[in-house]
Amino acid sequence: MHIKKVYGLIFSVAMAAIFALSGFSLEPSTASTHQTASEPINSASELLAQSRFGTFKLPPLPYEYDALDEFIDTQTMTLHHDKHHAGYVKNLNKAISSYPSLRRLSIEDILRDLDRIPEDIQSTVRKNGGGHANHSMFWEIMTPDSSGEPTGDIAKAINDTFGDFATFQEEFNTAGKKRFGSGWAWLVMNKDGSLEVTSTGNQDSPFMQGQYPIMGNDVWEHAYYLKYQNKRGDYLDAWWNVLNWDEINNRLDDAQSWVKEIS
Ligand SMILES: [Fe+2]
């Protein structure tokens, strides 16, 4: 088993225990120990550790801002990552700063148990925690070196579920086009291991609905308007040119592990 997966499994069990054994204290604290998104960004492994056991950090883009420029322009990538995502991280950290116990939870665990988040910060955590989780996935599943067509297990899973890749693309793009206002189009795994195309509004995450997000496209106007203006469909079509199918396969693997874990 991959070391990252072993780590994640151990972590999930530990976090479940924290919830179950009431280490998850909802007592607010007046201490101001949280860090902000403007502080230095460290290595990927440090980011992972800090985001799981400390305050949340803005992960760096895994490529240059102009790497996807043919399909997603440099200015959009810069503003999207450095302003929009950074804002979600900053607001999330500010919200949880009064509840130190929340800093022991991963963002996935927070989103899965949103009802247990204190009422006075629940809406803020929903918007900004969802935004942080969604965008952290979004950067990782894109690459300037896309293989174009799906590869490996995800290719088989798509064919098994939707018949072929073209049918899946059409269903996914339709979900993105039909999302009124801001939101996301998703390929998710359900608790029974089945795949499904869905859509969420605003920054809601499939984790909130008991699903595992395998891949998702951001259909907020901030993701495409500078290059595509009102033509969301053109953006949805272009996005397939920048997908990192290796990373999407990793997420499929993680989703399958999650299904085994909860079964
Ligand atoms: Fe976005």
Image (cartoon, grey):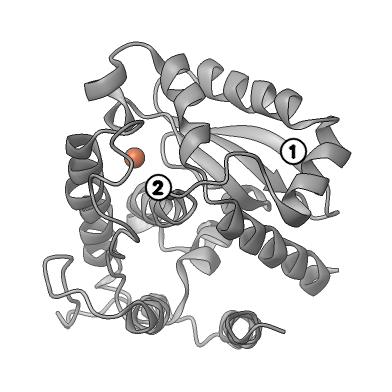
Residue at the disc numbered 1: 196
| Mark 1 CB within 8 Å of ligand 1 | no
Please report the residue visible at 43 percent of the width from the left and 82 percent of the height from the top.
Answer: 104
Residue at the farthest top position: 230
Position above or below: 167 against 131 = above
Three-letter code, disc 1: Glu
Residue at position x 71%, y 25% from top? 166
Label 1, label 2: how far apart the Cα atoms are: 26 Å
**Horizontal placement of 189 versus 72: left or right?**
right
Task: Return the residue at label 2.
Answer: 144
Q: Mark 2 belongs to which amino acid?
A: Pro
**Rendered location of residue 84, percent (x, y):** 23, 45
- At horizontal 35% and vertical 77% (from top left) the residue drawn is 44
Please tell me which residue lies in front, 17 or 197: 197
x and y percentages locating residue 20 in the rendered image: 64, 82
The image position of residue 157, as x and y in percent, is 81, 47
The quarter of the picture showing ligand 1: top left
User: SS at mark 2?
Assistant: loop
Tell whether 196 sits left or right of 38: right
Asked whether, in this view, residue 154 is left or right of residue 70, the answer is: right
Query: Does 52 appear above or below 211?
Result: below
